[in-house]
């Protein structure tokens, strides 16, 4: 019985000491650092947590922007498939958006397009082909039309 009580007292003492150190760091962080009591380096941990939170907000904003860009590209390619717009009109819609997409200019490293408009056109055509992959008849007719429009791009 005495051994159990001694263990419980030890655990309670350590827990109390831990709480006292945490409280001291919250109340007087400079004092804790000055006397070397900031053994867990709470200030650095809090600063790291703040930085990670800022990065998370930035990454989430980028994710939302990318999802919106993809949705816009899907809507544009859908209208292009249905021949409601031309390839040039589709490029006009997506060019301002894709201009700021990081890494977009590196999409074709082995066969770079002559202009950014051509790069956007290739992106749209690739998207259309992916959407029509299960409909080979429509893919053939739409691809022929888009290839002719691509060849006429300036």
Image (spheres, helix red, strand yellow):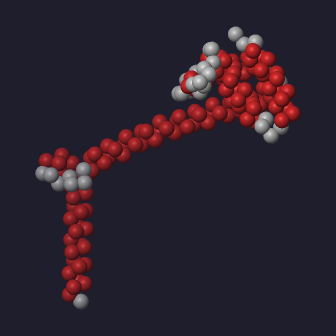
Q: Residue furthest front?
A: 110
Left or right: residue 88 compared with residue 44: right
Give the image location of residue 80, x and y in percent. Answer: 78, 26
Taking 32 as reference, is 89 above or below it?
A: above
Residue visible at 42% across and 39% down in the picture = 54
Residue 93 visible in rendering: no
Residue visible at 21% across and 48% down in the picture = 29
Give the image location of residue 92, x and y in percent. Answer: 69, 18
Give the image location of residue 140, x and y in percent. Answer: 83, 29
Q: Residue 69 is drawn in which quadrant?
A: top right
Q: Residue 67 is drawn in which quadrant?
A: top right
Q: How many numbered discs sit on the rendered protein?
A: 0
Residue visible at 70% across and 29% down in the picture = 126
Give the image location of residue 74, x and y in percent. Answer: 71, 33
Q: Considering the image in quadrants, where does the C terminus appear? A: top right
Q: Residue furthest left?
A: 35
Q: Residue furthest bottom?
A: 1
Left or right: residue 123 compared with residue 53: right
Residue 91 visible in rendering: yes
Residue visible at 87% across and 33% down in the picture = 137
Q: Residue furthest top?
A: 154
* Residue in the foreground of this view, choosing between 72 and 110: 110
Q: Considering the image in quadrants, where does the N terminus appear? A: bottom left
* Residue in the foreground of this view, choosing between 135 and 79: 135
* Residue in the foreground of this view, choosing between 73 and 131: 131
Left or right: residue 80 compared with residue 34: right
* Residue in the foreground of this view, choosing between 61 and 124: 124
């Amino acid at each position: 019985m005495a051994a159990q009580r001694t263990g419980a007292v030890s655990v309670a003492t350590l827990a109390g000491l831990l709480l006292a150190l945490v409280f001291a760091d919250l109340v007087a962080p400079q004092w804790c650092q000055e006397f070397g009591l900031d053994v867990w380096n709470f200030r650095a941990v809090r600063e790291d947590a703040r930085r990670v939170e800022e990065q998370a907000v930035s990454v989430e904003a980028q994710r939302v922007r990318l999802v919106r860009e993809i949705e816009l590209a899907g809507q544009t390619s859908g209208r292009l498939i249905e021949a409601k717009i031309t390839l040039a009109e589709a490029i006009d819609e997506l060019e301002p958006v894709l201009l700021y997409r990081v890494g977009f200019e590196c999409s074709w490293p082995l066969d770079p397009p002559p202009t950014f408009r051509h790069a956007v056109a290739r992106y749209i055509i690739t998207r259309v082909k992916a959407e029509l992959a299960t409909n080979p008849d429509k893919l053939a007719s739409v691809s022929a039309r888009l290839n002719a429009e691509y060849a006429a791009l300036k």
